[in-house]
Image: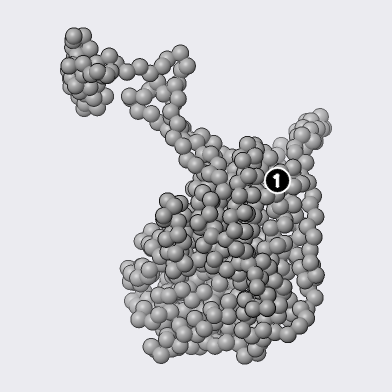
């Protein structure tokens, strides 16, 4: 760019014309990206207020409607509709359909797969409002949270996979060593088959699309079990993918969505899928492992976190606070990599608490599709409010100060709203410092003596290890602290941006699970990894030396020892001696 700015006057009209001509020709020969249309139902396509009564208990099972899952807007507790509660037989049928379609899909080129993903991308870009609206209705989040957490992340995933996926899945050549200098060795990544995905409820669009993108690009079929709490939106979101597949000339059965209760999820684990990718709690994750173990079926487990954010004493609090607020209250705290513990150094502790209280009091909460602008929406699960309350009450009973919130929002009795909350003076004796809150609660802990060592000790005193953040004016200091944190991910002077770098693997350690998705590691995890050795020259083939052929000659052992000595002895004299030993063994009768 700098060269062009300095020398633009020397660029001739002929050169410009040639560049334009080449660009036009290049564009003409690119695969045409189809434009798709996805039918939408009444409440999917407008912000019109839901009609009907509210159902405070939000019961997903209605005895008068067997075989159905009742769906609700968590911000109003009004019914959105119902979806099928699939039986194990229906789950197995869906897996069989995906497997049949996958047999042909596995033969497609990366170019064809990119075309499907770009078709989905174009639809997302032109229907952002619709996708955000449907996410808001099904999960209670503000449209902005849906845009940032559902749309933006999905678009970046598609861009990253389309730009880098083929390179990541190309054969990976490896060094062969002295014994095999006449060979080429490489790892190749073939489609695994059909992936089974069990997705959580906090991001209904992205949590499904995430694994559809990587799974299909790797040549697989994908069968996703969505949460019973956010099943209503799955019809629309699945239709986007299936329409894109059809428009590009492929079998839409490749991608299937399972709706239902625990029985359906268990059936998916026990079905003919080749791998399970689960996101959820450690307790349910263990049950998934138990179900997969008798079948020796591999699993990827992302089991949530208790992510810390460290604020060192040299920080400008006003610069850090927007990150802290977003980390604690984005999606009403329902983030596996949200900030659940804020460690603030002693010398700036009270100032930090004062600013946190002022900003949190200013947050606006309410139904996401109402007339008022809001910052925090509703909780998806009504039971989660009781979990949050018990953790907050335990903290207060043990000495924490509740400075904002700390209770259900009484202004919205017909909705799952918990007030944005600030707890100061939290200690590790409190349950809230150790158990996942998954709600809009900022827990502030004091680091005594402004000690980096003490901060790391406190942060690592936790059974989770997903993400982490460290803030300091000194980047070397922040990086040193970050290197000592036992977690799968860390941001220095930032929060949560690991996930916007989709070339990085996502996952944690300890109770946060194992294995990874995203990045080359995640894409390759969707594949059958095969080690391959071939001749470097077709005219030069491997033969087994005569002394080592069956039946083994009396000189076979000496021949083998000579061969080992030639390859691995330290000195030239030892290697010469090994050559002599090998030759004697070879000539021996």
Q: Which residue is mark 1?
A: 251
Query: For this view, does 520 lie left or right of residue 154?
Result: left
| Residue occupying image coordinates x 54% and y 58% | 268
**Foreground pick, 147 / 408:** 408
**Whole-percent x, y for residue 11 in the image:** 76, 33
Q: Quadrant of the N terminus?
A: top right
| Residue occupying image coordinates x 40% and y 80% | 431
Q: Residue 435's image quarter?
A: bottom left
Query: For this view, does 238 lie left or right of residue 277?
Result: right
| Residue occupying image coordinates x 56% and y 48% | 194
**Whole-percent x, y for residue 572 in the image:** 21, 21
Q: Is residue 515 above or below residue 324?
A: above
**Whole-percent x, y for residue 325 in the image:** 56, 74
Q: Is residue 19 above or below residue 64?
A: above
Circle 1 residues within 10 Å: few <14, some 14–19, many ≥20: many
Q: Residue 460's image quarter?
A: bottom left
Residue 16 in sight here: no
| Residue occupying image coordinates x 50% and y 71% | 339
Q: How is the image coloured?
A: one colour
**Whole-percent x, y for residue 421 in the image:** 53, 83
Q: Residue 29's image quarter?
A: top right
């Amino acid at each position: 760019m700098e060269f062009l700015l300095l020398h633009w006057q020397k660029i001739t009209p002929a050169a410009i014309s040639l560049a334009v001509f080449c660009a036009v020709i290049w564009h003409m020969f690119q695969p045409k990206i189809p434009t798709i249309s996805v039918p939408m139902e009444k409440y999917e396509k407008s912000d019109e207020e839901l009609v009907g009564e509210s159902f405070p208990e939000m019961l997903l099972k209605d005895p008068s409607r067997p075989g159905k899952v009742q769906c609700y807007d968590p911000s109003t507790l009004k019914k959105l509709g119902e979806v099928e509660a699939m039986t194990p037989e229906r789950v197995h049928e869906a897996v069989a359909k995906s497997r049949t379609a996958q047999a042909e899909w596995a033969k497609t080129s990366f170019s064809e797969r990119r075309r499907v993903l770009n078709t989905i991308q174009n639809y997302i870009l032109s229907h952002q409002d619709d996708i955000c609206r449907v996410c808001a209705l099904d999960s209670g989040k503000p449209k902005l949270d849906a845009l940032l957490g559902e749309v933006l992340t999905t678009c970046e995933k598609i861009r990253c996979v389309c730009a880098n996926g083929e390179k990541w899945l190309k054969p990976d050549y490896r060094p062969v060593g002295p014994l095999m200098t006449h060979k080429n060795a490489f790892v190749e990544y073939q489609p695994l088959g059909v992936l089974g995905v069990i997705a959580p409820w906090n991001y209904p669009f992205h949590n499904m699309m995430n694994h559809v993108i990587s799974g299909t690009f790797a040549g697989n079929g994908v069968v996703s079990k969505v949460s019973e709490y956010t099943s209503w939106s799955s019809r629309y979101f699945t239709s986007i993918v299936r329409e894109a597949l059809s428009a590009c000339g492929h079998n839409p059965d490749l991608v299937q969505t399972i709706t239902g209760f625990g029985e359906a999820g268990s059936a998916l684990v026990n079905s003919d899928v080749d791998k399970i990718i689960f996101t959820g709690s450690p307790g349910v994750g263990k049950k998934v492992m138990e179900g997969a173990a008798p079948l020796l079926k591999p699993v990827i487990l992302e089991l949530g976190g208790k992510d810390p954010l460290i604020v060192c004493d040299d920080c400008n609090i006003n610069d850090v606070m927007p990150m802290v607020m977003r980390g604690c209250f984005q999606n009403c705290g329902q983030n596996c990599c949200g900030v659940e513990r804020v460690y603030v150094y002693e010398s700036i502790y009270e100032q930090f608490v004062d600013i946190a209280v002022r900003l949190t009091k200013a947050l606006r909460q309410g139904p996401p599709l109402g007339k008022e602008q809001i910052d925090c929406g509703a909780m998806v699960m009504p039971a989660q409010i009781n979990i949050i309350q018990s953790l907050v009450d335990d903290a207060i009973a043990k000495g924490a100060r509740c400075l904002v919130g700390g209770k259900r929002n009484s202004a919205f009795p017909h909705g799952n709203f918990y007030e944005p909350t600030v707890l100061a003076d939290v200690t590790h004796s409190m349950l809230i410092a150790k158990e996942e809150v998954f709600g809009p609660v900022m827990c502030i802990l004091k680091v005594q003596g402004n000690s980096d060592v003490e901060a790391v000790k406190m942060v690592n005193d936790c059974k989770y290890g997903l993400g982490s953040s460290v803030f300091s004016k000194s980047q070397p200091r922040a990086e040193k602290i970050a290197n000592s944190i036992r977690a799968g991910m860390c941001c220095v002077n930032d929060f949560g941006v690991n996930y916007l770098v989709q070339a990085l693997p996502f996952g944690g350690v300890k109770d946060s699970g194992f294995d990874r998705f995203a990045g080359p590691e995640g894409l390759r995890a969707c594949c059958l990894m095969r080690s391959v050795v071939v001749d470097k020259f077709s005219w030069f083939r491997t033969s087994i030396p005569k002394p080592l052929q069956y039946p083994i000659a009396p000189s076979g052992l000496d021949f083998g020892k000579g061969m080992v000595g030639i390859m691995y002895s330290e000195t030239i004299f030892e290697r010469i001696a090994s050559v002599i030993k090998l030759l004697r063994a070879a000539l021996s009768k």
